[in-house]
Image: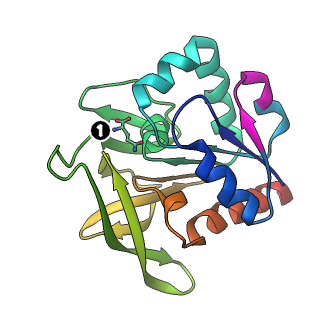
């Protein structure tokens, strides 16, 4: 399985390591044409506004086409990019997830924190999971076709809609590999259909 990690900016290397540990072949995506050679894509954390600038209009359009047809997983800034409604400030999104997401929603005081949340699995139910939040956004609205796959307190913090997954925390910074494994499963299911 060939997985791309968008490597324009941000913490792409931690995703690369995790995916390689799990047996995937990783391509660091720096040019739009590289999207043609991969089965799935991870959009890492960073600064979503900067991602938009670095992508440029052509890169953004190419990425928009990609996320419509291929499995994609966005963490933090990546989750912001995938949304169809972005607040604080308003910003363009790829529209792959029917969610409203608010950037930097936890304020300066609790900029970053490690908390325990719950991972929700259709088969095995709920189980605790460590979550690393860094200047995290908050998912304020979840559309009817969006499944909540993790919560922290009463907030949804990871969601899935079809082939697209997003988390407002950073699973690549914890030792737990379950979230990345769930994404790889999504990619391998996609390959078989
Ligand atoms: N605050 C960043 C943004 O709004 C996201 C932070 C992150 O990716 N860790 O884009």
Where does residue 94 sit, x and y in percent of width and height?
A: 51, 31
Q: Nearer the viewer, residue 122 or 1?
A: 1
**At 29% from the left edge and 38% from the top edge, which residue is drawn?**
103
In this rendering, position of residue 43 left or right of residue 36: left
Taking the image as drawn, is residue 163 in sight? no
Residue designated by label 1: 103
Q: Residue at x 68, y 56 (%)?
A: 17
Q: Residue at x 66, y 60 (%)?
A: 18
Instruction: Give the quadrant of the N terminus.
Output: bottom right
- Reply yes or no: does residue 107 show up in magenta: no
Q: Give the side of residue 172 with respect to residue 19, left or right.
A: left
Determine which quarter of the picture holds residue 132: bottom left
Which residue appears at 71% of the width and 61% of the height? 184
Q: Where is residue 183 in the image (x, y as percent from the top left)?
A: 64, 60
- Where is residue 34 shown, x and y percent of the image? 79, 29
- On screen, 130 above or below 19? below
At mark 1, the secondary structure is loop
From the Cβ of disc 1, is ligand 1 less than 8 Å away? yes
Using the image, determine if residue 175 lies above or below residue 143.
below
Does 140 sit left or right of 73 as displayed? left
Judged from this view, the residue extending furthest toward the top is 57
Give whichever of 41, 140 is nearer the camera.
41
Q: How many labels does the image show?
A: 1
Q: What stretch is highlighted in magenta?
A: 27-34
The reply to whether residue 53 is in sight is yes
Dot 1 alpha-carbon crowd within 10 angstroms: few under 14, some 14 to 19, many 20 or more: many
Name the image quarter holding the C terminus.
bottom right
Q: Residue furthest bottom?
A: 124
Split into quadrants, the picture shows ligand 1 in the one at top left
């Amino acid at each position: 399985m060939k997985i791309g990690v968008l490597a324009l900016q941000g913490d792409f290397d931690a995703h690369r390591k995790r995916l390689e540990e799990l047996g995937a072949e990783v391509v660091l995506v720096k040019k739009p044409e590289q999207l043609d050679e991969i089965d799935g894509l991870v959009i890492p954390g960073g600064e979503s506004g900067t991602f938009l600038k670095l992508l440029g209009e052509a890169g953004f359009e190419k990425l928009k086409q990609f996320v419509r047809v291929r499995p994609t997983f966005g963490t933090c800034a990546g989750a912001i990019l995938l949304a169809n409604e972005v607040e604080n400030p308003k910003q363009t999104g790829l529209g792959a997830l029917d969610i409203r997401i608010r950037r930097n929603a936890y304020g300066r005081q609790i900029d970053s924190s490690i908390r325990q949340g719950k991972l929700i699995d259709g088969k095995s139910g709920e189980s605790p999971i460590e979550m690393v939040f860094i200047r995290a956004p908050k998912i304020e609205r979840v559309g009817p076709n969006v499944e909540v796959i993790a919560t922290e307190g009463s907030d949804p913090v990871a969601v899935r809609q079809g082939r697209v997954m997003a988390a407002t925390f950073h699973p690549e910074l914890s030792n737990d590999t379950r979230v990345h494994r769930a994404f790889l499963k999504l990619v391998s299911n996609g390959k078989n259909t």
